[in-house]
Image (cartoon, rainbow, N blue to C red):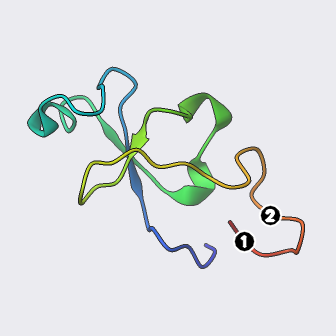
Amino acid sequence: MGNYSITYAIYNPRWVYGVDEKLLKIGSSEIAPEDYEQYMHGSIFCPKCFTPLSRNPSKKNISKNAKTT
């Protein structure tokens, strides 16, 4: 496993940011950074503050300068 700033995200494609946070965890999955897939974009959230997360670069596990993302 790489050196990630967030160890996991909450993935829930049915939840909408800003709606009752208690509903986010219903039907959600914990996703490790190395398990992120492009189709999850817009549906991954911080497990602590429930804000949307993004991945940079969004399509690769390794950035151009060879750091794990």
Q: Quadrant of residue 7?
A: bottom left
Residue at far front of view: 18
Residue neighbourhood size for the residue with mark 1, other residues' Cα within 10 Å, grouped as few (<14), some (14–19), many (≥20): some
Q: Which mark is residue 62?
A: 2
Residue 55 or 11: which is nearer the viewer? 55
The amino acid type found where label 1 is placed reads Thr
Q: Quadrant of residue 52?
A: top left
Left or right: 66 in relation to 31: right
Total numbered labels: 2
Left or right: 36 in relation to 13: right
Picture coordinates of residue 39, whole percent (x, y) = 61, 28
Residue neighbourhood size for the residue with mark 2, other residues' Cα within 10 Å, grouped as few (<14), some (14–19), many (≥20): some
Q: Quadrant of the C terminus?
A: bottom right
Q: Quadrant of the N terminus?
A: bottom right
Left or right: 18 in relation to 67: left
Of the image marks 1 and 2, the number of the one nearer the N terminus: 2
Left or right: 31 in relation to 58: left
Picture coordinates of residue 38, whole percent (x, y) = 66, 35
Q: Is residue 53 above or below residue 34?
A: above
Picture coordinates of residue 65, whole percent (x, y) = 88, 74
Residue at far top of view: 14
The amino acid type found where label 2 is placed reads Ile
Q: Cβ–Cβ below 8 Å for labels 1 and 2? A: yes
Cα–Cα gap, marks 1 and 2: 5 Å
Q: Is residue 51 above or below residue 49?
A: above
Q: At x 35% / y 31%, what residue is drawn? A: 12
Q: Is residue 69 above or below residue 35?
A: below
Disc 2 is placed on an element classified as loop
Q: Is residue 69 above or below residue 51?
A: below
Q: At x 40% / y 25%, what residue is drawn? A: 13
* Residue placed under numbered mark 1 in the picture: 68
